[in-house]
Image (spheres, grey):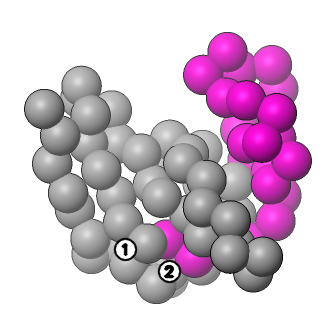
Amino acid sequence: MHRHNTPLRGAKATPRPAPDDPNYTATNYAYAGKTGHIHEVVEIGGRRLAKVGFDDRKIVYYFLDDLEIDA
């Protein structure tokens, strides 16, 4: 079960995942350090993930705790 939470929609976010985190793929690391915008926040299994969109129109999910958010 998941819940949607969108108060952060539109906020600038820069992903900063920990190195070698098994929860992330090469795509996550390719976009690490790049600034995008949060589309929505979803809670799945008690963990909050942000759907982050980038200038090249790519959407990548990150744990909310791994984002620097510039509201």
Residue located at (33% from left, 32% from top)? 47
Residue located at (30% from left, 50% from top)? 42
Q: Quadrant of the N terminus?
A: top left
Mark 1–mark 2 distance (CA, rounded to whole Å): 6 Å
Q: Residue flagged by tag 2: what amino acid is it?
A: Ala
Q: Which mark is residue 8?
A: 1
Q: Position of residue 13 (x, y in %)?
A: 61, 69
Residue range (magenta): 16-38
User: Front-most of 57 and 42?
Assistant: 57
Residue 53 figure quarter = bottom right
Left or right, 56 with reference to 2: right
Left or right, 1 with reference to 15: left
Kindly check if marks 1 and 2 are in contact, taking CB atoms under 8 A apart as contact: yes
Q: Overall secondary structure of the magenta stretch?
A: loop
Residue 23 figure quarter = top right
Residue 4 figure quarter = bottom left
Disc 2 designates what residue?
11
* Residue 65 appears in the rendering: no
Left or right, 11 with reference to 53: left
Tell me if mark 2 has few (under 14), some (14-19) or many (20+) residues whose alpha carbon lies within 10 angstroms of its own: some
